[in-house]
Image (cartoon, coloured by chain):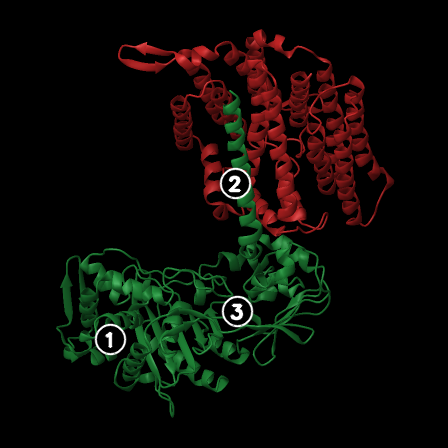
Chain colours: A red, B green
Amino acid sequence: MTLSRQTERSLLWAVFVLGWLAFILSWLAVPVWEPQALLYPVAITLALYLVHCSLVAMGSYADELLLPLMAVPIFLGVATLYRLDRASAFWQVVWVLLGLCPLLLLQLVSGFKAWRPYWALFMLGGLGCLAITLFFGTEAYGAKIWLKVGPVSFQPSEPAKILLSLALAGYLATRKELLLVRSWKLGPVNLPHPAYFGPLTMALALALLLMVVQRDLGTGLLLFGLFVCELYVAAPRWDYLLLGILALAGGSIVSYRLFDHVRVRFDIWLNPWEHASGQGYQLVQAMLSTSAGGLLGAGFGQGWPQVIPAVTTDLTFVAWCEETGLAGAVALIIVYMLLVQRGFKAALTTDDDFLALAGVGLTSLFALQSLVILGGALRLIPLTGVTLPLFNYGGSSLVSTLFSFGFLLRLSAEGRA
Amino acid sequence: MGTNIQRLLRLFIGGFLLVVLALTNLTVFQRDRLMASPHNNQRITGWDSQSLRGGIYDRHGEVLAVTEKKGGSRHYPGGQALAPVIGYLDPKIGAAGLEARYSAELSGRPPFWAALGLNFPLAAVGEDLILTVSKELQIEAMQLLAGRRGAAVVLDPRSGAVLALASQPSFEPEKLSDQWESISQDKAAPLLNRATQGLYPPGSTLKLVTLAAALTQRPDLLTKSYSCSGELTLPGYTIHCPRAHGELDLTSAFAVSCNVTFAQIGLELGNSTIAKQAEQAGFNSTIPFDLPVERSSFPLGKAGDGETAQRSIGQGQVLASPLQMALVVSGIANNGVVLRPYLVQERRIGGRTISRTQSAQMGEFVLPKVAAATAEMMAEVTKRGTGKGAALSGVQVAGKTGTAENPHGAPHGWYVGFAPAKEPRVVVAVVIENGGSGATAALPLARRLLELALKEVS
């Protein structure tokens, strides 16, 4: 059998047509066009096509849908950013090129299974990443989550999420049966086994700590969600998970009472219109922008999403909504649903517990992060500053998401080979 | 583990579907409301510069708002007198009133076009709006209110067309950005449209609702005889009348606005019966209108005797906007049926009518025979009661005064009414904040407005 990856190639071409169309439309909307503008779509097209060619050359068995599906938000994201802010688009292209390298390198690695015993190392790494900003971090947008090395800003919480996801997968894979069956008897009371209780408590503590100390509500919520997802898949104990969720809710209420910045976020969420000219400005403008799109959108380059603060880093999706309408937004959401489905499918193909859990963890992380920001922008939950993976501007997020998908690609290849 | 992964997938898909639902809600169902928001001003003015904005005209074709050239500034020949109706469009401040509500149409983006979300204009010239308002009557209403805080609504009960919608103090829409500092911080709140968004205790004008409820639910109360000793002591509250009215029937009690009698009737009916009657005219829900409306309220549920008695004479926790009281009266004037109030009669492109507003029923306030009986009793108010001063030569006027106690000082003066008493053509509602008694503060204005408005509609 030759591995020409015909499906992948055809789909990629379709994505290229889509992406170029978006670029052509945004060029039509500006009065002056410069030839350098071609560099953006050309670079993205070449990079994605090269990844495809490399996969063919490697004779990879990897899922042929994953790469074209990823290509949709990457290409359209760069096009939307180009329309909003050239500089962001430029750096986003650079980050795409950089991020695709680890994705390809991962395809050369065989035997991920061997990573399982190093879970403690991953854990330390992840916690280290989270801790480092506490001491060396710089504050931006009210959260102390950035690390500045020379001219480059970097968000250590992004690799931390991946490391912690792998760590938990390794930990759970080695203790799976133990978790499900045994409980810890203390006299007449059946307590959950510490093996189960441990990670749950840790997730809870981390989430609350992140919320309170680093003012990073988004990452706190994501990590907690991630742990719950992996625990559920490894050993579904509804009672404990429910207990965990209740505890998180309780913790949130307590921190709402105690800490101003948490309270402000919630108040904006509950009554955005009362704060419409102040702290709720971003959320109100995001809702107005989304709503302005209507069914088919203003047309690429025709809307007014520039009025939203931090539109490139947090709310690029809202700009997309305004200019392509409900139709474009739903189309993009369907791509995200398919990406999640392909991620879980990759996790299902492997018979190794660690790999399956790691696949589930990374996919859940992607899904949760997407839902947290989409829900935030639409006021289903409080708005937090996490990025829509693959679409928003954000180097650290892009590179680590591409790393996750590199892992999932390799996982799907290993399962099929 | 496989099944768990499948379940988790389904959970996430559910999450994404929820996002799709929220998106649909924002882009389809909430769109009209959100796009008219004052916080959307940058987008509105941005859209606006792409086409020649349409004009706004009164019922006789008088210019109320006009833009001379594409992207040019907006002129308001009516000045502050028309501001409560038109609102404003200002590149720095944004838009309000009809300018905000009909922004899409005025800038050449008809609703079907805007619903698709297409923001570039369909035509280079926007639509013109022809209003139901009469510029002359509006200016007169604003002059009558000048120097006071208050509002007046004049409408045609047979169609729901609003002839005048006045609110003082007002502002000069063309000078808004220069005076923004002082206007937005003015304690008298000139930006507040008191006719639609001002909520006041309705005082005795609410007896119309109590009376309607009594005539509908308990016709026996009509023939009963009442006695008023000047006060009625209830647990927690004492109802007062200015003097002891003695023995009297219901018609006389209404004509002299006897609080004790109406408190007794209110207690007979119970809080929820009156509340439901009030809801028939639009209380506790948002009146559909071309301008933002504050919800008038009559609390539902069980209430103590003191509270029920207060509410049945329009005190306590009952709050109503002048527009709301005008609708109560228009229900009585229009055989019991309340028609949806509206300001925009027609939309035109280049002189061609593309949409004409049809009268629509908003609700049924009372049965025709109850409406007729109430109208007769309102005519008695003018003949021999508190509203004597409203009489016009040659036309019988039906009305009701109100003097609403409030915690902010002197009582608010109210007058609501219609003319002619038989086959009414105009309804009026006037409130003067802290103006004292309804008969002295509000009634003379209302009389003048009725007189002028009758000339407008035949």
Question: Which residue was labeled with disc 1?
Answer: B257
Q: Quadrant of residue A51?
A: top right
Calculate the distance from the C-alpha at mark 2 to the C-alpha at mark 3: 39 Å
Residue at point 44%, 67% (across, down) = B195
Q: Earlier in the sequence, mark 2 or mark 3?
A: 2
Residue at point 54%, 27% (across, down) = A219
Question: Which residue was labeled with disc 3?
Answer: B85
Residue A32: where, in percent of width, then height? 83, 47
Nearer to us in this view, B125 or A12: A12
Is disc 3 placed on a helix, strand or loop?
A: helix
Residue at point 52%, 36% (across, down) = B15
- Say above or below: A358 vs A385: above
Q: Amino acid at mark 2?
A: Leu
Residue B134: where, in percent of width, then height? 53, 78
Q: Amino acid at mark 1?
A: Ser
Residue B273 placement, left or right of B127? left
Question: Which residue was labeled with disc 2?
Answer: B18
| Discs 2 and 3 share one subunit | yes
Q: Can residue A294 be seen here?
A: yes
Q: Chain of mark 2?
A: B
| Discs 1 and 3 share one subunit | yes
